[in-house]
Each structure stands twice: as structure tokens, then as C-alpha cells.
Image (tube, rainbow, N blue to C red):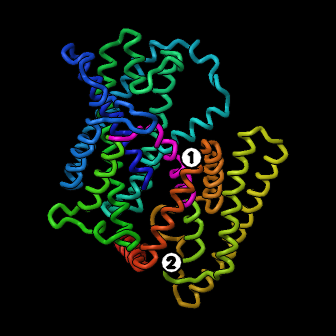
Amino acid sequence: MLDYHIGAASIARSLASYLINILELFPVFKDNIPKWIGHGEDIGDVLSINVLAPILLVLLTFILCRGVQESSVVNSLMTVTKIIIVIIVIFAGAFEVDVSNWSPFAPNGLKAIFTGATVVFFAYVGFDAVANSAEESKRPQRDLPIGIIGSLLICIALYIGVCLVITGMVPYNLLGEDAPLAEAFSSKGLKFVSILISVGAVAGLTTTLLVGLYVQSRLYLGLGRDGLLPLVFAKVHSKYHTPVHSQIWVGLVASVLAGLFNVHVLSHILSVGTLTGYSVVSACVVVLRWKDKTNSQVSSSAEREGIICLIAVALCGFASGLLYRYDASFIFLILALVIAVGASAALVFRQNTLMVVCVKYTKRRGNLKVYADAPGFSCPGVPLLPNICIFFNMFLFAQLHHEAWVRFVILCVVMVGVYAIYGQYHANPSAEENVYQRALEEEAL
């Protein structure tokens, strides 16, 4: 949840900065707009005043409160606009590339690449956004995998193309921080392209922010429905059919963060939550394959053994990341890899054994349906693929700064406290079962 809050604040500040850049193209506004309006006026290391960012968040929150149809129209228009502009930027910039700027291709070495990838890993938080709209999809078993994988592949291609063009046009150490694309094209005398980029950036950041706010409200809706958060978050507006209370809360928190805090400092904790969150999701995929949620049972001892293997894979990934980061002996790195492979092999054996048990159990009840044979898309390569995901997520986790680890531990303690004080006494386990059963019934129809 914190990832989405800080991510929304960070994107809102970037969006405000690009809007100010567009206004400053007009002579009347050039150098006449105070920093605290859109670019941010820093006060110390943590505080940074920005007025425009909260205003933008309030406007988008209002659109989302009106309903999915209204927000999807805005999102579709913005998405088409930004993709067209990105393609134009790639082709226009390709003719201005100086290949000497790519030499050396990795000036700070491989470790810096891993660190950079870890810091900006929170950018991938948008791709799981599609999954959180499952209840509003007609055929989620088919549509969600296509949406997630398709958007990921398209964005990878566009991202690599833009990165090659911008670093080929201008040396990487001369790129601006707030609006690098626009500044790169302006330096080459392509003023019209820089204007186009600013428009595209506004469209892109708007859609990203819109989706982020939308998804987060649905997460609060799910947590409220499960009883892990107060029931007010689960209430849906009778007319607009949207979780208005959750949506307003999400917009309010993001507005405070965007208007008052230096998001560059807060963003260091973003990738920590994303990496661990994706690791937990991967582990859950493995656990859910151990049993059919309605028909079969798995012994607690077998489940404990499987969980120990998953924890071993995560610890080996983290240890490998630390060993690589601090140039430890290659032997220790190999040892961590061997242990991770051994734990994965044990999980594969455990998976096959448990599936046999599930089939035998369901045969006795006259029902051969098991969770692994659920209709629609099913994650391939379980448990190996989730294990690889957990290992590399934890490897990247180890590349983060020590401050991020400390902040993460503190936040974990706080969140566990929330669960201990409120969540465990109000949790409604049947809510999950009802949603699961309804999804299968609708798919069968």
C-alpha cells in the first residue's frame, strides 16, 4: 500500500513539473513561475513544497469517484496519445544518435546496473494493476493474463528504445533529472519534438497516476471486505458503484505526500515493498497449488516443510545479493546458489507428492477437480518459476541502501501491529472463499 501512496505522490510531482515546463514555453511564463508551484521548493532534506501536485491528485480522484467508465475513457485517450508520441520520439531521435555516447556502455559497471534496477523496480508496480480489476472484467481468466503480459512486452520494447535514443543523443551524465527527454531534444535544436515530449509525458504520467489511484482504492476495498481494515473502506457508492471512501482516502494521503515531502527521499523505500510484495505473491502461487481450496486438505507438517523451502530460497537470494555486492568469495556465492537449487528441488518433489495426495483425496469424494486444473490461465512452471522470481527479487533487495532495509523493518513492525490490534479480530476468511467460488462459477457460465 505504501508503494502505491509514494508512487502516486512521486508521479504527481513529475506531472506537475512537466506541466510547468509546457507553460514556460510561453514567454509570459518563462522564469516567472515560483518553484513551490510545480517544480518543488526544498526545505531541508525531507520537506519540499509543491502546490500543483495535490491539485492534480484531487482532480483525478474526482474522476475516479464518478465511475470506471468515465476514468477508462480518459485513460484510453491518454494511452493512445502517449504511445504515438513515444514512437515518434524514438524515430526522430534515432537520427540524432551519436554512438560514441554509448562508449563505455556501462560506465559504472554491472553492480551499478543492479542497484539502478533495484531503485526503479517500483515502476513495475503498474503491471499488476490489471489483476486488481478482476471483479470488473468480463472474462478475467483470459483477459487479465493477456493484459498483463501484453502491456509488459510492449512497455519493455518502448522503454529500451527510448533509453537507447536519449543516451545516444546526450551523454548520460548531462541528462536532466526532472524532464530529461525534453531537455535532450531541446539541446539538439528539436524544439518541436521537446514540446511533443512534454505533451506525451503529461499524457503518460496522467494515465499512470490514474491507474495507480484506481488500483489502490480496489486494494483498500478488498482489505476492508476481508475485515483487515475498517469496513468503511469496503463501502461502494450506490449510484457510481465505486469505493468512494477508499478512493478519497487514497487521494488524500497521496496529496499530502506530494505536497509536503521530498519524494526522492521517500522513493528509496518503494522498491523494498515492491520486491518483497512480488516475492510473497510468488510464494502464494506455490502454496495455493498444494491444495484445492474447497476439496482437499494438506497436512500442517507438509505445509511447514514447503514454507521452510520457500524461506530458504528467499534467504539464499538475499545472501547471494550481499555476497555479490561486497565482492565476497565466489565459493560462497556458489554455495548459496546450490542451497537455493536444493530447496527448489525439494519443493518440486513436495509439489508432485501433494498433487498425488490431492487426486487420491478427491477421488474418494467422487470429484476429480483440483486447483492446478482451474479453468483459464494457470501460472506455468510451478514451483520453479515462482522460486526464480523470489530468488532474484531478494537478490535485488540486497542491492538497496541500508536505510531502505531499516525503514522496511520499521514499517513491517507497524503493519504487524495494525494486524495484531485490529486485523486478526475482524478478519473475515469467508470473503475470500466467496470471491473464489463466484469467479469459478462465472467462468463456467
Above or below 204: residue 405: below
Q: Of 59 and 382, which appears nearest the observer? A: 59
What is the magenta segment's predominant secondary structure?
Answer: helix
Quarter that holds the N terminus: bottom left
Q: Where are the magenta residues, as a range?
A: 260-281
Residue 444 seen from this side: no
Element assignment for label 2? loop
Quarter that holds the C terminus: bottom left
Residue at 51% across / 66% down in the picture?
416
Amino acid type for the residue under numbered disc 1? Ala
Report if residue 212 lies within the magenta region.
no
**CB-based contact (under 8 Å), mark 2 and mark 1:** no
Residue 69, percent from left and from top: 21, 53
Above or below 2: residue 308: below
Query: Which residue was labeled with disc 1?
Result: 404
Mark 2 against mark 1, which lies toward the viewer?
Answer: 1
State the image quarter where residue 370 is shown: bottom right
Report if residue 262 lies within the magenta region.
yes
Residue at 25% across / 61% down in the picture?
245
Element assignment for label 1? helix
Q: Residue furthest top?
A: 189
Residue 132, percent from left and from top: 38, 58
Residue 65, percent from left and from top: 21, 55
In the picture, the disc for residue 293 is: 2
Amino acid type for the residue under numbered disc 2? Lys
Residue at 25% across / 55% down in the picture?
248
Residue 177 seen from this side: yes
